Amino acid sequence: MAQAVPTPATPTGARTGAGPGTPRRTTPDVFGKRTHLLTKWAMPVVTALVYGYWVASVRRHGGPITGWNLLIGFMSVLAFAVLYFVVRAVARRLPREGHAALWGAFAGSALGFLYSGSGVAMFTCILASLLLAGAVTAALVYHYYTRRDAPPQETRADRTT
């Protein structure tokens, strides 16, 4: 009995032009280019705003909101956003381990600055920052080694005899 062979073209172009060394998409892209572009720029800005508010609230220690408190919050937003965009631009050019280490250092530094404003001992602040940086680096190394540059998975259509 004859069976229909699936066509290699899909709406997302996942299999079009895929050679033996080209990794395949395993999930369809459900969002358009405009949504991805908006997310690419909006997510760091929103994250920076949350981070700046958090820094300002930690620095005021439950007291009243002052002008200096607002200034430190806005400066934190600006610094976080600029550093995020710089790290994202530089990390693309690095190998997997460097990419993971740079993001780990960014996360550890952000936590260290935030935690130091609470008035804890500097040793505790450094220890917490190093632990977070190590955890982020290890998680990203694992992520990049298991998902980037992975050999393409063989499908039933590829095994036709």
Image (cartoon, rainbow, N blue to C red):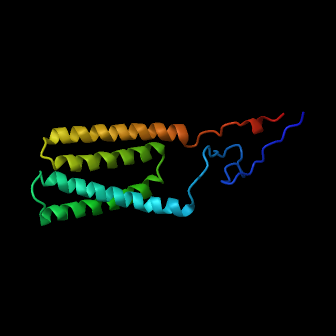
Residue 114: give x, y in percent of width and height.
22, 49
Placement of 70 over or under 118, stated as above or below: below
Q: Is residue 24 left or right of residue 96?
A: right
Residue at image point 33% right, 49% down: 106
Residue at image point 69% right, 54% down: 11
State the residue in front, 1 or 97.
Answer: 1
Q: Quadrant of the C terminus?
A: top right
Placement of 102 over or under 36, stated as above or below: above
The quarter of the displayed image where residue 65 is located: bottom left
Residue 108: give x, y in percent of width and height.
29, 45
Residue at image point 62% right, 43% down: 26
State the residue in front, 9 or 95.
Answer: 9
State the residue in front, 1 or 5.
Answer: 1
Q: Quadrant of the N terminus?
A: top right
Residue 59: give x, y in percent of width and height.
15, 53
Q: Is residue 94 left or right of residue 158?
A: left
Placement of 30 over or under 97, stated as above or below: below
Q: Is residue 152 left or right of residue 67?
A: right
Residue 88: give x, y in percent of width and height.
42, 56
